Image (cartoon, helix red, strand yellow):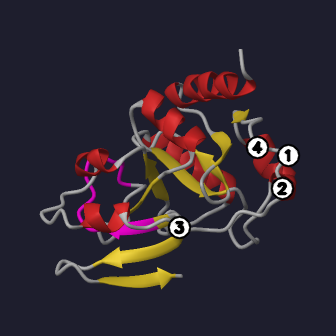
C-alpha cells in the first residue's frame, strides 16, 4: 500500500476518534480535527495556546458542501471561488452545523475549498469538514516547511502525516477575504 493511502487511513481513524492530525494543506502545514467535534476543536486551542475568541478556519472538499455549513442566500460566491487559483479563505456570515467554539463571535466562519489532492481525498473520505490552523503556538511565526514545526506541536497531535514532509519549498498562507451581502468583498490578507 502506498504511503499516501496509509496516511489517509490513519488520519481517518484519528479524526473519527476525535483526535488531532498534523497534515500538509494547500498552503502551510496545519493542525486539523473533525470540525464538527467541539472537544477536538478545544484540544487544538489548548495545543496552540490560542484564545478561543480567535476563530479557526475549516477546509471543504468542494463548493457543494458550502450550504451545509453556512446559510448563503446568494450563490454568486461559487463563480468567484471557481475563478481563483491561489488558495483563498472566504469569511462567510451565518455559520451553521459547527460547534460554538469554532464559530466567530459575530457568527461567521472562514472556509477554504481545497485544491490539494491529499486534502481533497482526506476530506472526501471523511465526509465532513476538517479544521485547519497553522502548525504553530500562538504568537510564534507560521512554519513554512515541516522541519520548522515546533516539537511541542508534533508531540501534541495524535498523528503526523508522512506525505510531503521532505518538501523544502516554503508554503504560503492563504489570501483571506470577507464577502459582503451585495457581492462585493474586502481583502483582509492579500
Q: Main secondary structure of the magenta part?
A: loop
Percent x, y of residue 178: 36, 77
> How far apart in space, not on screen, are marks 3 and 1 (Cα)?
23 Å
**Helix, strand or loop at mark 1:** loop
Q: Quadrant of residue 172?
A: bottom right
Q: Position of residue 50 (x, y in %)?
A: 61, 63
Q: For marks 3 and 4, give the CA distance.
A: 19 Å
Q: Are marks 3 and 4 in contact (CB under 8 Å)?
A: no
Q: What's the mark number on residue 150?
A: 2
- Label 2 and label 1: CA atoms lie apart by 16 Å
Give the alpha-carbon distance from disc 1 to disc 4, as whole Å: 5 Å
Q: Earlier in the sequence, mark 3 or mark 4?
A: 3
The residue that label 1 is drawn on is: 166
In front: label 2 or label 1:
1
Above or below, 24 relative to 13: below
Mark 2 against mark 3, which lies toward the viewer? Answer: 3
In contact (CB < 8 Å): disc 1 and disc 4: yes
Amino acid at each position: 500500500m502506498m504511503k499516501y493511502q496509509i496516511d489517509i487511513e490513519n488520519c481517518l481513524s484519528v479524526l473519527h476518534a476525535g483526535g488531532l492530525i498534523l497534515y500538509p494543506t494547500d498552503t502551510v502545514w496545519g493542525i486539523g480535527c473533525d470540525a464538527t467535534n467541539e472537544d477536538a476543536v478545544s484540544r487544538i486551542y489548548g495545543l496552540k495556546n490560542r484564545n478561543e475568541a480567535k476563530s479557526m478556519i475549516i477546509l471543504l472538499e468542494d463548493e457543494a458542501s458550502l450550504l451545509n455549513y453556512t446559510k448563503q442566500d446568494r450563490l454568486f460566491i461559487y463563480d468567484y471561488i471557481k475563478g481563483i487559483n491561489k488558495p483563498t479563505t472566504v469569511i462567510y456570515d451565518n455559520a451553521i452545523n459547527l460547534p460554538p467554539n469554532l464559530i466567530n463571535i459575530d457568527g461567521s466562519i472562514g472556509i477554504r475549498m481545497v485544491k490539494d489532492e491529499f486534502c481533497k481525498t482526506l476530506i472526501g473520505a471523511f465526509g465532513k469538514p476538517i479544521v485547519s490552523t497553522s502548525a504553530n503556538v500562538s504568537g510564534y511565526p507560521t512554519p513554512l516547511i515541516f522541519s520548522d514545526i515546533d516539537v511541542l506541536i508534533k508531540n501534541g497531535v495524535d498523528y503526523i502525516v508522512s506525505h510531503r514532509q521532505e518538501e523544502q519549498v516554503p508554503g504560503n498562507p492563504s489570501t483571506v477575504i470577507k464577502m459582503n451581502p451585495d457581492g462585493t468583498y474586502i481583502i483582509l490578507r492579500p
